[in-house]
Image (spheres, rainbow, N blue to C red):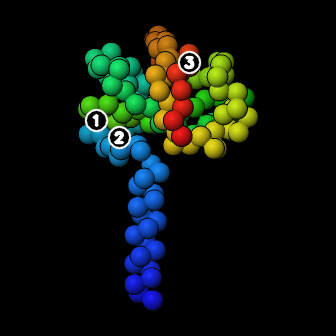
Amino acid sequence: MKQLVITTVFIFSTLGNISCDRSNCTTENSIFKENTPKSKAYKNELAKQLKSIDKSKLTYWLQKHELLDGKESLYFYIQSDGLCAVLHLTMNHWGKLEVLRAKKGVSYRGAEFKNLTFEIREDAISTDFIYKTFDRIID
């Protein structure tokens, strides 16, 4: 019986690792640790980091869809050499993502988005990341 439990745990652990291609990352950035991805401080720090790294090396993995006060947004894990953060992406249009929107992101969680592009809008009051497009989804 003990052998069966060990074998079952091993199989499920292996399958879990195979099905999830996103590498785990941790951040030492105190701003990311102490603030939420929706906060101005977090967004300002992420915008600053994005200006100083090679964007071609960024990877994006869908975390979740959010509907709050009639506004929809998506959250992505965003990773690169030295960057481990969550991107709160404002959705003003849903070009190429209509199915994801209809399913509220449920069947796309953990999917990698290739060449996700967005605009960074900064002013004294807010910093926002606005969805533009992407090339493809790897699920």
In screen coordinates, is 56 left or right of 89?
Answer: left
The numbered mark at residue 29 is 1
- Position of 85 relative to 94 (above/below): below
What residue is at 56 percent from the left and 18 percent from the top? 133
Please state if 24 lies on the left or on the right of 105 as rendered. left
Q: Are marks 1 and 3 in contact (CB under 8 Å)?
A: no
Q: Are marks 1 and 2 in contact (CB under 8 Å)?
A: yes
Badge nearest the viewer, 2 or 3: 3
Q: Amino acid at mark 2?
A: Lys
Q: Quadrant of the C terminus?
A: top right
| Label 1 packing within 10 angstroms: few (<14), some (14-19), many (20+) | few
Eyeballing the image, is 131 above or below 70?
Answer: above
- Circle 3 Cα neighbour tier, 10 Å, few/some/many (<14 / 14–19 / ≥20): some
Real-space CA distance between mark 1 and mark 2, rounded to the nearest whole angstrom: 6 Å
Rendered image quadrant of residue 43: top left
**Residue 22, percent across and down?**
40, 43
Residue 30 visible to an observer of this rendering:
no
Q: Is residue 137 left or right of residue 83?
A: right
Residue highlighted by disc 2 = 33
User: In what element is the residue under mark 2?
Assistant: helix
